[in-house]
Each structure stands twice: as structure tokens, then as C-alpha cells.
Image: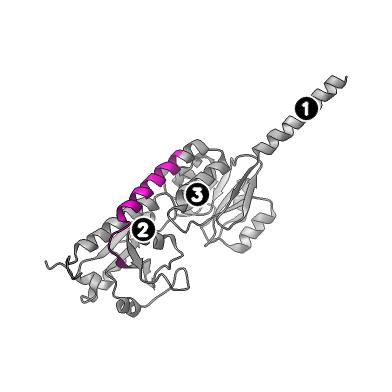
Amino acid sequence: MMKRFGAMISAALLGCGLNAQAAITVQDDAGDMVTLQQPARRVVSLSPHVTEMLFAAGGGDRIVGTVTHSEYPAAAKNIPRIGDNRSVDIERLLALKPDLLVVWRHNASSRQMEQLRKLGIPLFYSEPHKLEDIPEAVLRMGRLMGTEPQAKQTSGDLQRQLDQLTSRYRNRPLVRVFYQVWDRPLYTLNERHIISDAIRICGGENIFAKLPMAAPSITQEAVLKEDPEAVVSGDRRDQKVSGIEIWKQYPSMTAVRRGNLFAIDGDLINRAGPRIIAGATELCARLEEARSRRDGRDGKEVRQ
């Protein structure tokens, strides 16, 4: 009898140990610890870059809901929409019975997110600020979903690409860059945004890095005063005319005079997902073009 009782106690303790091991705790980009008792099976993504990250981590088949503009990879187009990255239909979201919400911290509705948190749904905030955060973010997504083997492989590939990019452009001459998000109204990004980090890695300097707002609206006069050597715009793929065309009316501007007006697919460069490393690779190539248009002795443009 005592032996059987002892065996039952041992089994119970073992079961408790297994349950304890099953718990997954990961820190999100808001600095909060997110704990799941088991890998997430029904995930709602509240940002396009999050959707890309979840697929990259091997959990695309676990996404049961997402927001508008989550169109990559192609399979993401078939996921039900429950709103956009600013506001969601809470009733539709709850009907999906998610066991994890992955949220873009910058754009999420704090009121709605607090409602969902009170309902007991775990929230993981995602907002990478540096390119080096991307491989680690993929790993954390993999841990939350129990898809670590694929997440580790993807993370390693991304880290190798980033290391090569950093090594190649580490000591290149500085290029002063104006990054244009949109031209109506005209606004840019400061140093806290991941794009500014991409510019830095490519050997560039964001001329508005020190502005206090993350995405400040600026005037054309302010840009002309700074006289950047290159203007880079993250255009949408469906945009008929690039927003950087507005600068051609200022032929004395250095970027215009040297032909350094560069448009890059906004889905690559504007989203803090895995593809931003490909976007940064293109950005680095464009800034290298800008360097090639200098006179090697005194920095003046090459005469055509």
C-alpha cells in the first residue's frame, strides 16, 4: 500500500515538473514578460510586419486572424481580417479564440489592448528598433509557438546576411541622407526608427535623426536647408509616381544635381520584419551609387 502511494506521489510530482517545463516565458519589446502554459496554437497578428515574422518563425499555419495589408507571404492573403493596425473588431477577434496576440506597440490602440488583456489573452508587443533585433525577434516568436527549429534556421540566415552587410559597409565614407516616408504631407523618421539604423549600417547619416518625434512632419524648406546628398523614399508598389519626384524642381539641391533620388519598395524598407534586411541591402547599394558620383579628390559630383 505504501509503495503504491509512494508511486502515486512520484507520478504527481513528475507531472508537476512536466507542466512547469511546458511553461514558456519570453520578454517582449515593451519589456514585459509574456508567459504561456503551452505553445500558442491560435495566434492573431495585429501588424503586417508581425505576420511576416510569424511565418518566418514557422508559425504561419497558426495565424487565425490578422489586419489589413498583411499580404506577405502569399499564404497570408487567405487569413481572416479583423481590422487594421490601429483598431480591431473585438467581437470578431474573440470569436477566433486566440491564445496569443502579437501587437505592433507603436500603433496599437491602448484602450482596446487593455480590454483584451483584462480578458486574459496574452499580449506580446513587437517593435524592433535595430536590424540586429530582427533575428532575435524571429527566435522569440518561435519559442512562443513551439516552432524553434525553423525559427533558429531563419534567424541564423538573417544574422549571416546582416553580418555580411555590416562588414561590407562598416568603413564606407559617410552619406547624408533624407529619408522620405511620404510627400503629402512631407514627413520623415528620427533615430529611434529601425530605418535610421539601416541608414547607419549602410554608412549613411539620417539628417533628421535628432528630431524629438519618431515620425515628424517637416517642410521642404527644412530639407533644402540640410541639402542632403541622397534622398531615399520607401514608396508603395502601387504608387504610379514616386514621391521623390517633388525634389526635381530644385536642381541646385545636391541629391538632385547628382542624380541621387532613390525609391525602394516600401514593403521591404518600412516594415520591421525579416524582409527589412533585404531592403537594407538595396539601401546600401543605392548609397554606394551616391558615393560613386563624387569626385574622389574633393567630394564634388562627377561631371557627366
The image shows residue 222, relative to residue 6, as above or below, that is below
x and y percentages locating residue 45 in the rendered image: 53, 50
Q: Does residue 98 appear in this view?
A: no
Q: Secondary structure at mark 1?
A: helix
User: Where does the C terminus fall, quadrant-wise?
Assistant: bottom left
Residue 254 horizontal side relative to residue 200, left or right:
left
Would you name the residue on which mark 2 appears? 201
Q: Residue at x 58, y 58 (%)?
A: 30
| Label 1, label 2: how far apart the Cα atoms are | 55 Å
Residues 14 and 141: in front is 14
Please tell me which of labels 2 and 3 falls first in the chain: 3
Region of the chain picked out in magenta, as a range = 153-177
Mark 3 secondary-structure assignment: helix
- In this view, which residue lies farthest toward the left? 304
Q: Residue at x 39, y 53 (%)?
A: 276
Residue at (28% x, 75% y) in the render: 227
